[in-house]
Image (cartoon, rainbow, N blue to C red):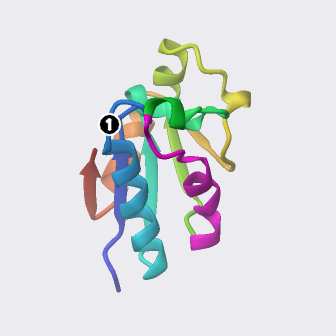
Amino acid sequence: MPKSLLIISRQAPWSGPGAREALDIVLAGGAFDLPIGVLFMDDGVFQLLPAQKAAELQQKDLTANLKALSLFGIDDLYACSQSLVDRGVAPEGVTIEPLQLLHGNELAAIIDRYDQVITL
């Protein structure tokens, strides 16, 4: 049985290649039917907002990648609720579903559930 993988995405979509690289890893793993989850936390929660206007910052728009997650069988999508609150991001305004909001100890429990964890 393949090992499960959790990608923790902590970078804003406009802060460099980290957010795009995290999604690329997720989509590649999904193409090989690996059990994968994605946790958006810290500035990574900004990836969940619509209308990023990435071209203005000479970055790739991540919206299509986020919408493709379910097509690749990636349904374990999580966001740190405290990161959303700290950055003024309303949960009902995010672009991907289903998104599970995690609080405090739930974060540690999700991380422990996966065999491998990569943070970008």
Q: Residue 54: where, in percent of width, then height?
A: 52, 36
Up the image or down, 43 lies above or below 102; here it is: above
Identify residue for label 1: 16
Count residues near mark 1 (Cα–Cα under 10 Å), then give few for <14, some for 14-19, many for 20+. some
In this rendering, position of residue 102 left or right of residue 104: right
Residue at 40%, 72% (x, y): give it. 29
Which SS does the magenta portion mostly show? Answer: helix
Residue 36 location in percent, x, y? 43, 65
Query: Which stretch appears magenta?
Result: 58-72
Residue at 34% in and 49% down: 111
Q: Secondary structure at mark 1?
A: loop
Q: In the image, 49: left or right of 34?
A: right
Residue 102 in view in this figure = no
- Residue at the image position 64 percent from the left and 55 percent from the top: 67
Residue 49 placement (x, y as % from top left): 62, 32
Q: Is residue 65 above or below residue 46?
A: below
State which quadrant residue 64 falls in: bottom right
- Establish if 17 lies above or below 57: below
Q: Amino acid at mark 1?
A: Gly
- The quadrant the N terminus occupies is bottom left
x and y percentages locating residue 22 in the rendered image: 36, 52
- Residue at 58% over, 71% down: 73
